[in-house]
């Protein structure tokens, strides 16, 4: 079945540092890939997505590239801010069947001033 | 107004009680989902529905039931709550595109 493995946290960085959160996946077919973000006390918000190999999703300075050859979708940001502190989830969606999202376990990111 | 709403936002109940969590959406999406989130486990699918007459079990449906009262409403029930059902519950909707849209969540505590 489908699975997502993401970098365990927690991750603590200083403001303006470079961020990478690793995510690899196992899936049949050609899944769509996502990063969702959960700010404290809130629900999940879609941060970015990519629907086919070599696509790059980007939003709010975050980027991730769909790498089929390495089955990866690593999240990056060049200069993090305190407001980026949240829990980040990598997820994939199969393109057939129930179309459910399969999530990684989440990575808690804390940015210190 | 939020596109996907969940009520209640927080609930504390006792073992053996029946609980209903409600989800409403104004996005006009046909597909609706219920997930639960546990620390260190990500989100797991409980039930999903592709339309009013289509209800399907997810990976952890035991102890839960659902009702799709209308295209816009999808309720999750715990017939007899137990402590290991303490979790954060999310409703989500989906159209024909790949992404899902989540509600704000319901934090349920079963004592």
Image: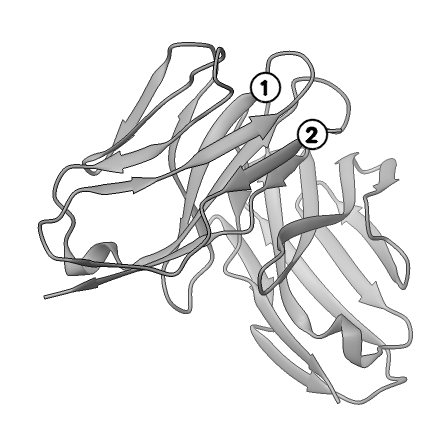
State the image quarter where residue A1 is shown: top right
For the N terminus of chain B, the image quarter is bottom left
Nearer to the camera, B37 or B33: B37
Q: Residue at x 49, y 52 (%)?
A: A106
Q: Nearer the viewer, mark 1 or mark 2?
A: 2
Q: Position of residue A109 (x, y in %)?
A: 32, 57
- Same chain under badges 1 and 2? The reply is yes
Q: Which residue is mark 1?
A: A31
Q: Is residue B9 above or below residue B58?
A: below
State the image quarter where residue B19 is shown: bottom right
Judged from the image, the secondary structure of the residue bearing numbered disc 1 is: loop
Nearer to the camera, A4 or B64: A4
Question: The disc numbered 2 marks a residue on which chain?
Answer: A
Q: Which residue is mark 2?
A: A2
For the C terminus of chain B, the image quarter is bottom right
How many numbered circles are shown? 2
Circle 1 crowding by C-alpha within 10 Å: few under 14, some 14–19, many from 20: many
Nearer to the camera, A84 or B14: A84
**Left or right: A104 with respect to A86?**
right
Whether residue B9 appears in this view of the structure is yes
Q: Residue at x 41, y 57 (%)?
A: A9
State the image quarter where residue B40 is shown: bottom right
Q: Is residue B58 above or below residue A11?
A: above
Question: The disc numbered 1 marks a residue on which chain?
Answer: A
First in residue order: circle 1 vs circle 2: 2
Q: Is residue A5 above or below residue B19?
A: above
Judged from the image, the secondary structure of the residue bearing numbered disc 2 is: loop
Q: Residue at x 27, y 59 (%)?
A: A85
Circle 2 crowding by C-alpha within 10 Å: few under 14, some 14–19, many from 20: some
* Whether label 1 touches label 2, CB < 8 Å: yes
């Amino acid at each position: 079945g489908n699975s997502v493995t993401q970098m365990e946290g927690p991750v603590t960085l200083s403001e303006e540092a470079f961020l990478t959160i690793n995510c690899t996946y196992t899936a049949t077919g050609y899944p769509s890939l996502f990063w969702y973000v959960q700010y404290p006390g809130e629900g999940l918000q879609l941060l970015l997505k990519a629907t086919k190999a070599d696509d790059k999703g980007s939003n709010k300075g975050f980027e991730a590239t769909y790498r089929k050859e390495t089955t990866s979708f690593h999240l990056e940001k060049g200069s993090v801010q305190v407001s980026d502190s949240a829990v980040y989830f990598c997820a994939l969606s199969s393109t057939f069947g129930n179309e459910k999202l399969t999530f990684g376990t989440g990575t808690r990111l804390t940015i210190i001033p | 107004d939020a596109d996907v709403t969940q009520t209640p936002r927080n609930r504390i109940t006792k073992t053996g009680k029946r609980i209903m969590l409600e989800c409403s959406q104004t996005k006009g999406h046909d597909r609706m989902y219920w997930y639960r989130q546990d620390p260190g486990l990500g989100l797991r699918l409980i039930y999903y529905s592709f339309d009013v007459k289509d209800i399907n079990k997810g990976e952890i449906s035991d102890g839960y039931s659902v009702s799709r009262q209308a295209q816009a409403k999808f309720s999750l029930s715990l017939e007899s709550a137990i402590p290991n059902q303490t979790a954060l519950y999310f409703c989500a909707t989906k159209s024909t595109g790949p992404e899902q849209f989540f509600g704000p969540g319901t934090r349920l505590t079963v004592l």
